Image (cartoon, rainbow, N blue to C red):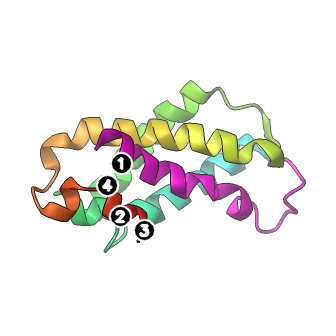
Amino acid sequence: MRAIFAALFVLLSGSFSSAAAPAAPVTESIPREQFKTQFEKRMIEGFCKETKFVSHCYDIDEKSCEGEIRSALGKCMTTASLPKEIEAAKRTHIGTKIGRCLGEDFQKKNKPRLRMIPECQNAVEWLGK
């Protein structure tokens, strides 16, 4: 389950390059802080809002989920050693690396909160949603 849960974060973060900087062409670099802000927003919206995997499968409210995501994201972005400018060609790779770290960290910290319902034990079902 751990790898599958991380894959959910990777899938969401992998599509980040096309949505990372709507105002700037994909061929341009964006500043590290802009990347961090947009990536955080995307991860929170993708996992903490109502009817998403985390809110459905974990006994955690939206505000706590956001805090957990921010905490893990801070650690994972530091570990990723982001350059000052994020080139468009590298956004997907960087996003995937951070997404995997984020998913693994979140799952490890919140394992006791996992609801024991069938769809949450088999996260593969969520990959298609």
Secondary structure of the residue carrying numbered label 4? helix
Secondary structure of the residue carrying numbered label 3? loop
Pointer 4 with pointer 3, Cβ within 8 A:
no
**Which amino acid type corresponds to the residue marked 4 in the rendered image?**
Cys
What is the C-alpha distance between the residues marked 3 and 1? Answer: 13 Å
Question: Which label's residue is closer to the chain start, 1 or 4?
Answer: 1
Image spot of residue 29 (x, y percent): 85, 47
Question: For mark 3, what is the residue?
Answer: 128
Question: For mark 1, what is the residue?
Answer: 5
Pointer 3 with pointer 2, Cβ within 8 A:
yes
Magenta span covers which residues? Answer: 1-29
Residue drawn 14% across the image and 62% down it: 118
Res 4 visible: yes
Residue drawn 16% across the image and 51% down it: 114
**Which amino acid type corresponds to the residue marked 2 in the rendered image?**
Trp
Residue 85 lies, with reference to residue 25, above or below; the image says above
Question: For mark 2, what is the residue?
Answer: 126
Question: Which label's residue is closer to the chain start, 3 or 1?
Answer: 1
Mark 3 surroundings within 10 Å by alpha-carbon count, few (fewer than 14), some (14 through 19), many (20 or more): few
